[in-house]
Amino acid sequence: MPNKMRIKKGDRVQVISGKDKGATSVVMRAIPENRKLVVEKVAVAKKAQRPTRENPQGGIISIEMPIHVSTVMLVCPKCGKPTRVSLRSDEGKKVRVCKKCGKDID
């Protein structure tokens, strides 16, 4: 399967499955080669951190883990609902389109 993802960094998404189902947040990082996303305050794991020069205290920190792109839906900025995304060609440029309201996303 080609690594095309229709969700980008900075998009608002809603989680549709998993332990954080229903959460709405912003994509912090996209990893297209693995088809995964890092979403703010979703899939948070605890990690033991060694003391370093930057963090001399060390201790247990919270870190967002990547989740699969199929577990989220893009929230349309126009209609505010979670929606699927289609692509339309506009003067040689690909434009993402909301399947619910039909408006351009970007």
Image (cartoon, rainbow, N blue to C red):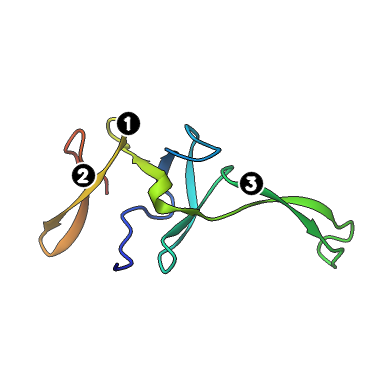
User: Which residue does the image show at 33% across and 30% down from the upper left?
Assistant: 80
Image quadrant where residue 99 sits: top left
The residue tagged 1 is: 81
The residue tagged 2 is: 104
| Disc 2: CA contacts within 10 A as few (<14), some (14-19) or many (>=20) | some
Image quadrant where residue 50 sits: bottom right
Give the Cα separation between the discs numbered 1 and 3: 24 Å
Query: Does residue 46 lie above or below 21 as drawn?
Result: below
Q: Name the spot of residue 57 as percent of width and height, x first.
A: 89, 56
User: Which residue does the image show at 19% across and 39% down from the upper left?
Assistant: 103
Q: Earlier in the sequence, mark 2 or mark 1?
A: 1
Quarter holding the N terminus? bottom left
Give the Cα separation between the discs numbered 3 and 2: 32 Å
Q: Residue furthest left?
A: 91
Classify residue 34 as left or right of residue 58.
Answer: left
Does dot 2 land on a helix, a strand or a loop? loop
Does dot 1 land on a helix, a strand or a loop? loop
User: Which residue does the image show at 42% across and 38% down from the upper left?
Assistant: 16
Does dot 3 land on a helix, a strand or a loop? strand
Q: Nearer the observer, disc 3 or disc 2?
A: 3
Q: Earlier in the sequence, mark 3 or mark 2?
A: 3
| Disc 1: CA contacts within 10 A as few (<14), some (14-19) or many (>=20) | some
Of residue 85 and residue 70, the one placed in the foreground of this image is 70
Identify the amino acid type marked 1: Lys
Query: Does residue 78 lie above or below 65 as drawn?
Result: above
User: Which residue does the image show at 36% across and 42% down from the upper left?
Assistant: 73
The residue tagged 3 is: 44
Q: Name the spot of residue 51 as percent of width and height, x first.
A: 87, 63
